[in-house]
Amino acid sequence: MAKNAIRVRYAPSPTGHLHIGNARTAIFNYLFARHNKGKFIIRIEDTDTKRNIADGERSQLDNLKWLGLDWDEGPDVGGDYGPYRQSERRDIYTPLIQQLLDEGKAYESYRTEEELQADREAQKARNEMPHYEYEYAGMSDEERQAAIDAAKAKGLKPVIRFRVPKDKVYAWDDMVKDKVSFNSDTIGGDFVIAKRDGMPTYNFAVVVDDHKMAITHVFRGDDHVANTPKQLMIYEAFGWEAPKFGHMSLIISKDTGKKLSKRDESVLQFIEQYRDLGYLPEAMFNFILLLGWSPVGEDEIFTRKQFIKMYDENRLSKSPATFDSDKLEWLNNRYVKEADSSVVADLAMKQLIKAGNLPANPDTATIEWARQLINLYKRQMSYMAQINDMASVFFQEPDKVEGDALAEISNETAPVVLKAFAAEIKKLDLFDSVEIFHVIKKVQAQTGIKGRQLWMPIRIAVTHEMHGPELPESIELVGRKTALAHIQETLDQLGA
C-alpha cells in the first residue's frame, strides 16, 4: 500500500476527559500518519448516550490541540468521509444491519436482562465462563417465529445479535504483538450489534466506520485485543478487507506494578489535571510518547518534528509501559529550564492568581515583580503550580526560625552580620539586587566575617529558609520594609 494512502484515526468516546492512555493512542496514530505522509482522522464514538458527558467531546479535542496534535478530518474540521460523530451516522448503520438480518448473519434477540442475568448465574454455578446461550436452540422455523411473535405481543424490544461462526479461527499479524489468534467458540457467543433503541454497538459501528472512512491501520490499546476477532467476523460477513491492527502494551503504575486504573486516585491520569498544574504540553507529548515506544540511542528528548521524522512503529514495545510520575516531573523540569521566560512567567502567574497570591487583575508593577520572582525559581520548578510553595515566603509571614536554621545562626557572629546588614540597607537609595550584593560585600569588609557565616544569617533572617534562589534577588523581591522587619524579629528571637 502506497504511503500516501495511509489513513489512521483516533476515535474517543465523549464519556470523560482525555486520559493518559487515550492520549498515547492519539499520539501514536498521529506520528504514524505524519511520518508516512498519511491522514490523521478524529472520529467521535458517541453511541453510548447514557455515559456521554456534556463537555466530553470539547475536552477531548481541546486537550489534543493543547498537546500539539492537529488532524486532517474530524467533527470540527469536516472532510470527505463524514459525518465524524457516530450519532450522526445512523442512516449508514441501519441498512447494513438489515442486510445482515436478511442474509441470516444476524437475528433479533428478545432475551431480557433478567433472563440473561439468570443464565450467567447458572453458568457460574457450573463453573462455566459467562456466555450467551442461543435462545432459539432446537426450535423449528415455526417455533422460532412463534417465540418472536409472543415477545413482540408483550411489547418487548429486541437487540440484534451477530451469528458467530462455530469453531473457526480468526488470526491476524499484529503490528505490535505479532501473530494473534482466537477460536470463535471462545468469545462468549453471539454478540449484540444493535441495541434495543436501534443504535449500533461499538464492535459493529467501528467496523462500518473504519471501512467507510478507508482506515488502513488501527493502533489502539491492548485492552481492545478481545474485540478484534468480533470485528474480523463483521468484516468477513460483508466481504470487506480489514485494516492492519496494532495493539499497544498496557500502561502500569510504577508503585503497584498493576494496570493503570482510572479509579486509582493516587496517580493523576487526565491531561486536564496536568494542564491545571502548569505542565508544558511539549513535555507531556514527549513523556507520553515514551510510554511504550523508544527512540534509537540513549537520548529521550526531541522536538515534535524530530519525533515525526524518526517515528518507527516497529519500536513499539511488547512489554508493559511504566507510568513514572517522578520521571515526568524531571522531564518537565528539563523543558521548563529551556522554555522562553515569558511563557514560564505567564503560566506561573496564573498559578499565583489561582492560589490567591496575586490579584486577579494585577497592575503593571505587580506583574513585573511577579515576573522577576518567577524567574528566580524557573530552574527549580518541575511544574508551575510549585511556585506557590517555593515562593511562599513572599506571600505569607514565615514562622519563627526553628530547628537546623536556628542552630545555624545561634552563634556570636550572626547578630553582628545582621545588625551591620540592616544598617547598610537602610541607607540605600536604590533597593535592588545589585546594590544589595554590594552591601553584603561591604558587611564582609566591615566585620571580617565571610562565607557561610556571612550569607546564611542573612538568608535565614530574611526568608526563614536555609536554601533558595539567589539571595540578593530574593531580598529585593521581599522588599526593604519586610526584610528589615524579619531581621529585627530574628535578632529579638536571638536576644540580640
Image (spheres, rainbow, N blue to C red):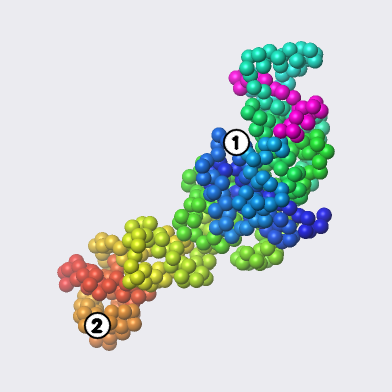
Name the residue at 33% across, 61% down: 359
State left or right for residue 153 relative to residue 235.
left
Q: Residue under circle 2?
A: 428
Q: Earlier in the sequence, mark 1 or mark 2?
A: 1
Q: Which residues are magenta?
A: 94-119
Query: Can residue 133 be found in the magenta stretch?
Result: no
Name the residue at 77% across, 27% down: 101
Image location of residue 263, percent across then percent down: 51, 41
Which residue of the protein is positioned furthest toward the bottom in this rendering? 445
Q: Main secondary structure of the magenta part?
A: helix
State left or right for residue 348 relative to residue 486.
right
Question: Residue 48 has which mark?
Answer: 1
State left or right for residue 277 relative to residue 492.
right
Image location of residue 239, percent across then percent down: 83, 38
395 over 95 or under it: above or below = below
Residue type, mark 1 in image: Asp
Comparing 43 with 202, the one in front is 43
Name the residue at 21% across, 83% down: 427
- Dot 1 surroundings within 10 Å: few (below 14), some, or many (20 or more)? some
Q: Which is closer to the viewer, label 1 or label 2?
A: 1
477 over 166 or under it: above or below = below
Label 1, label 2: how many angstroms apart (C-alpha)? 69 Å
91 over 155 or under it: above or below = below
